[in-house]
Image (spheres, rainbow, N blue to C red):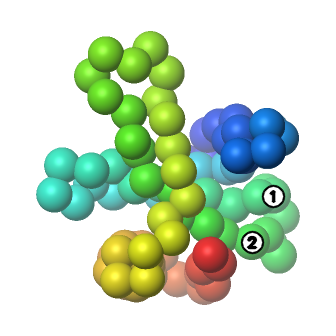
Amino acid sequence: MNNSIIFETDSGENITFYVEEETRVNGISYLLVTDSEEDDANAYILKDMSSDSDEEARYVMVEDDVEFEAIAGLFNQMMEDVDLLR
């Protein structure tokens, strides 16, 4: 997959993330992203918070422990050798 997206932090900083995998659970899209294309990259889970009227996708970091563990488990089943960070 390896498309890239620009993620804007709460402080307005832009970070490039590389999309490794995507899944949809209960109508919500989640992305598994890395902060580098190198083998030692950090991995994160982003949740799509966009509405149908939004022109661009709007993602947030998954911070809820239960949600994070559930989605991380799905991505771990989909891929090997992934250590997810929060």
User: What SS does tag 2 mark?
Assistant: loop
Residue drawn at x 79%, y 69% as measured from the top left: 41
* x then y, percent, for residue 57: 47, 30
Residue density around tag 1, few if under 14, some if 14–19, many if 20 or more, within 10 Å: some
- Up/down of 16 relative to 61, above or below: above
Residue at which label 1 appears: 36
Circles 1 and 2, Cβ within 8 Å, touching? The answer is: yes
Judging depth in this view, the residue of 85 and 21 nearest the camera is: 85
Q: Amino acid at mark 1?
A: Ser
Residue lying farthest to the front in this orientation: 11
Asked whether residue 70 is in view, the answer is: yes
When asked about the image quadrant of residue 66, the answer is bottom left
Q: Amino acid at mark 2?
A: Asn
* x then y, percent, for residue 58: 49, 35
86 lies left or right of 30: right
Asked whether residue 77 is in view, the answer is: no
Q: CA distance from mark 1 to mark 2?
A: 7 Å
Residue drawn at x 44%, y 14% as measured from the top left: 55
- Up/down of 56 relative to 11, above or below: above
Residue at which label 2 appears: 42
**Quadrant that contains the C terminus:** bottom right
Residue drawn at x 74%, y 71% as measured from the top left: 42
User: What SS does tag 1 mark?
Assistant: loop
* Disc nearer the start of the sequence (1/2): 1
Judging depth in this view, the residue of 23 and 47 nearest the camera is: 47
Residue lying farthest to the left in this orientation: 26
